[in-house]
Amino acid sequence: MKILLVDDEQLQLIRLEKACRAVIPSADYFIFTNPVKALEESEKTKFDVAFLDIEMPSIKGIQLAKKLKKNNPLLSVIFVTAYTDYALQAFNIHASGYITKPVNEAKIKEEIENLKNISPLPTTKKLQVKCFGNFEVFCKGEPVKFSYKKSKEVFAYLIDREGSAININELNAVLWEEDHPSYLRNLIADIQKTLKSLDCEDVFVKRHNECYIDVDKIDCDAYEYKKDNPNAVRLYRGEYMMQYSWPIFDE
């Protein structure tokens, strides 16, 4: 495990390092009083966890966290600060933890244990959809395999629209920017056939010249995120349906 420690106050940094080493003695530590130097190091070192002071002169901890996450979206950020009024900002950039000074081993241990114990999202439905990272579909924990790659992308687009009915022409425009009506009909038929084989045909609804997903019939990490499920919030690392060019996650 590679751990980044950043605090512009040398004494506070020494205390933080001592507490961290007591809890995680086997980790590799990268320690900086200068946040700019820490940011430079992040361009060549992939950290697992970053403990960041918030009030620093050159770059504030919140801004540093955003820049670090651009270099490594999977980075777990834990803020260490004497101030309590930054909690909302920390939450908004999906920080993994928030420690108030003075730092001690117990606080460090609690945050590290929280990183290890993110509870899985509920799987109450037959079909589970994973949007964070690459888009994937599972049935009772097993990957769902469509006959065509584009079928999966059509299904992803419908998931992204969260149950809104989509006109076939819109699907054409978004996925190809030109008309492929016969091909699209084949993809829709493939989705229907695949879901029917899994006894999940009621998930996909087709009527006239439009189709949509019945969102009540699936478990989806992105939907749970928008319901403020804390485990879903912690699972999101800024990556959404990464294999496609069109998705924009409305946080």
Image (spheres, rainbow, N blue to C red):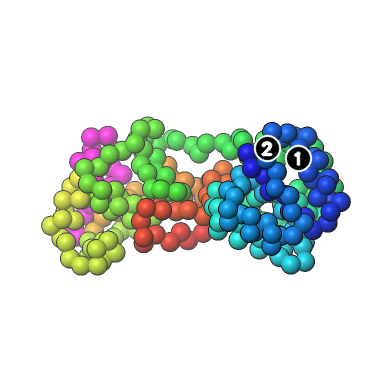
Q: Please, what is the three-letter code of the amino acid marked with disc 2?
A: Ala
Residue 5 belongs to the span the image colors magenta: no
Asked whether 182 or 30 is in front, the reply is 30
The residue to which callout 1 is attached is 20
* Element at label 2: loop
| Residue in the image at 54% along x and 52% along y | 73
- Whether residue 101 is visible: no
Contact between labelled residues 2 and 1, with CB atoms less than 8 Å apart: yes
Residue 237, relative to residue 170: is it above or below? above
Mark-to-mark CA distance, 1 and 2? 9 Å
- Whether residue 50 is visible: yes
Q: Position of residue 68 (x, y in %)?
A: 61, 57
Quarter of the view holding residue 23: top right
Residue 232, relative to residue 177: is it above or below? above
Q: Please, what is the three-letter code of the amino acid marked with disc 1?
A: Cys
The residue to which callout 2 is attached is 27
Residue span colored magenta = 191-209
